[in-house]
Amino acid sequence: MSALSFGEYLKQLRKAKGFKTARMFARKVGISNATISRIESGEIGTSPQMIRKLSESLGVTHPAS
């Protein structure tokens, strides 16, 4: 079994936390639906600041916190 990419992990965690769509999560985070979709698909990477914002929106601990 292969390891999940960050985007795949984010998508699984988002759904587990009750955000059925990327659009719902994007509204919570305060970024565009397209950006969430691109992160989840691995099309774009994320900055440490964005990872912190995503983590806070999901109610999980950021590794650098």
Image (spheres, grey):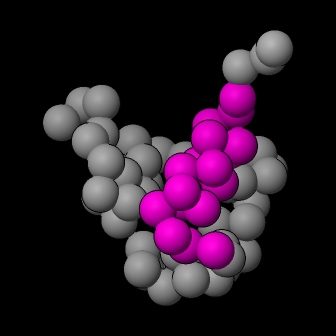
Residue 1 is situated, as x and y percent measured from the top left of the image, at 81, 14
Q: Is residue 62 above or below residue 51?
A: above
Q: Position of residue 59 (x, y in %)?
A: 29, 57
Quadrant in which the C terminus is drawn: top left
- Residue 36 vs 47, above or below: the answer is below
- Which residue occupies the foreground of this view, 18 or 41? 18
- Please name the residue shown 49% across and 85% down the image: 27
Q: Is residue 2 above or below residue 13?
A: above
In this rendering, the answer to whether 4 lies above or below 1 is below
Residue 8, magenta (yes or no) = yes
* Left or right: 57, with 31 as reference point: left
Residue 47 visible to an observer of this rendering: yes
Residue drawn at (64%, 82%) of the image: 23
Residue 6 image position (x, y, % from top left): 62, 37
Q: Is residue 17 magenta?
A: yes
Rendered image quadrant of residue 36:
bottom right
**Range drawn in magenta:** 4-20
In the image, farthest residue toward the left = 65
How many marks the image carries: the answer is 0
Asked whether residue 35 is in view, the answer is no
Quarter assignment of residue 37: bottom right
Magenta residues, dominant SS class: helix
Left or right: residue 5 compared with residue 50: right
In percent of width and height, residue 48 lies at 39, 42
**Residue drawn at (70%, 29%) of the image:** 4
**48 relative to 15 in the view: left or right:** left
